[in-house]
Image: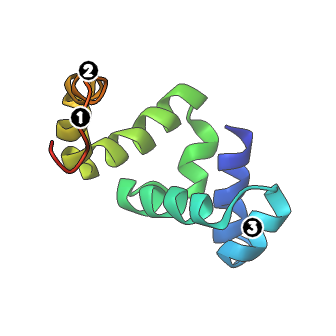
Amino acid sequence: MRKIRELVRLHEECGLSNRQIARALNISRPVVGDYLVNFKLSGLTYRSITTMDDDEVMRTLETRRKERCERYRILSEKFPHLVKELKKPGVTLELL
């Protein structure tokens, strides 16, 4: 959680690029981009997340992510069935 707050601070107050933030926090550049997109979609500001508790910040950011990935949720519900079918002889992903 500390890294997320720092990530937002570096972006908003320091004006660093995603690559510079990733190097400073030792996380991947795509992860920085994902968090920044979720943060911008949430409508929050850096000042507002400094007063929020960790759970509330994560809940807000994850809600946006879950809303965006409805297709993944539908697909993930089918995973147990697909795993079961793939264990059968002669069944491939192409057949499924």
Viewer-proximal residue among 48 and 93? 93
Foreground pick, 48 / 4: 4
Categorize mark 1 by other alpha carbons within 10 Å: few (<14), some (14-19), many (20+): few
Q: Are marks 3 and 2 in contact (CB under 8 Å)?
A: no
Q: Which residue is mark 3?
A: 21
Residue 44 in percent (x, y) is at 45, 54
Q: Position of residue 17 (x, y in %)?
A: 68, 79
Of residues 78 and 44, the one nearer the viewer is: 78
- Mark 1 = which residue? 90
Tell me where residue 10 appears, x and y as whole percent.
Answer: 73, 65
Q: Which residue is mark 2?
A: 84
Q: CA distance from mark 1 to mark 3?
A: 48 Å
Disc 2 marks a residue whose amino acid type is: Lys
Distance CA(mark 3)–CA(mark 2): 42 Å
Query: Label 3: few (<14), some or many (≥20) within 10 Å?
Result: many
Point out the frontmost of discs 2 and 1. 1
Q: Residues within 10 Å of mark 2 (few under 14, many from 20)?
A: few
Residue occupying image coordinates x 27% and y 48%: 69
Decide which of tag 1 and tag 3 comes sooner along the chain: 3
In the picture, which quadrant includes the C terminus? top left
- Mark nearer the N terminus (2 vs 1): 2
Question: The residue under label 3 is which amino acid type?
Answer: Ile
Q: Tell me the quarter of the picture where residue 81 sits.
A: top left
Q: Amino acid at mark 1?
A: Gly
Above or below, 69 against 52 in this view is below
Residue positioned 36% across, 47% down in the render: 65
Q: Is residue 94 left or right of residue 52?
A: left
Q: Quadrant of residue 18?
A: bottom right
